Amino acid sequence: MIVLQPLAKCLALIMLLISCDNTPPMTKAEIVPEKQFIFEGVRIEEHEAAKLVWVGMAERSTGDINNADAQGVHIRHFSKSDSVNASDQVFEIYGIRGQIGFEERKATLEDVRIETPRNGVLSGGNAVYNGKTERVQLDGPLIFKAPGLNVSAKQGEMILSDNVINVTGPVIGRYEWNPN
């Protein structure tokens, strides 16, 4: 288990004393006991059995390892399924803002956009990502676009390990196939 509180206090102190760029240092009002860390440019990777399973990134994050408020969220999910080809395993999940539980590998995101490994893009309102179950619950309206396919729906669920998107209605869609 990683203990971030002493590290966060040290980093906060360093950031108060030294500014490496033109951003103003944090103010005392930002350093409060309820906030265990305040980071700019967060990137956390998790590995299982020497295999990268997910990367969580955010432009700014405040909170603790179990619950962080984040802006500019980007999650890179690597599917663990053996039934999926290695080239089809990476999902890029973006949100304008959200809550991230790094230790639980969960996130609640607003204004979500998910890029699938097979050139599909799903965009919508809110999403709940669960990296352990490899599922994303989505509330819409949702729009899913892939080569030749355009679908809108009210809600959906992505099963990342199976490369599946289930949507619930009303559903409106159009598929254009290219016989060549």
Image (cartoon, rainbow, N blue to C red):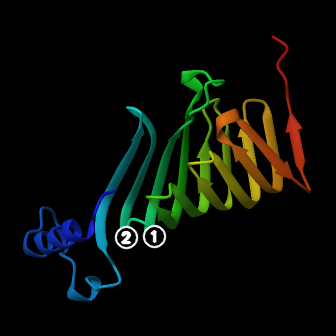
Residue drawn at (89%, 51%) of the image:
171
The residue furthest bottom is 29
Disc 2 element = loop
Quick one: label 2, few (<14), some, or many (20+) residues within 10 Å? many
Say whether residue 69 is left or right of residue 17. right
The disc label shown at residue 129, or none: none
- Which SS class for mark 1? loop
Q: Quadrant of residue 83?
A: top right
Q: Residue at x 30, y 71 (%)?
A: 38
Q: CA distance from mark 1 to mark 2?
A: 5 Å
Residue 77 x, y percent position in the rendering: 52, 42
Quadrant where the N terminus lies?
bottom left
Foreground residue among 38 and 172 = 38
Q: For the residues labelled 1 and 2, say whether their Cβ atoms are less than 8 Å apart.
A: yes
Amino acid marked by disc 2: Asp
> Residue at label 2?
64
**Quadrant of the image containing the C terminus:** top right
* Residue identified by numbered label 1: 67
Q: Quadrant of residue 13?
A: bottom left
The correct choice, above or below, for 156 with respect to 109 in the image is above
Identified at 90% across, 55% down, the residue is: 169
Question: Label 1 crowding class (10 Å Cα cut-off): few <14, some 14-19, many 20+?
Answer: some
Q: Is residue 33 above or below residue 65?
A: below
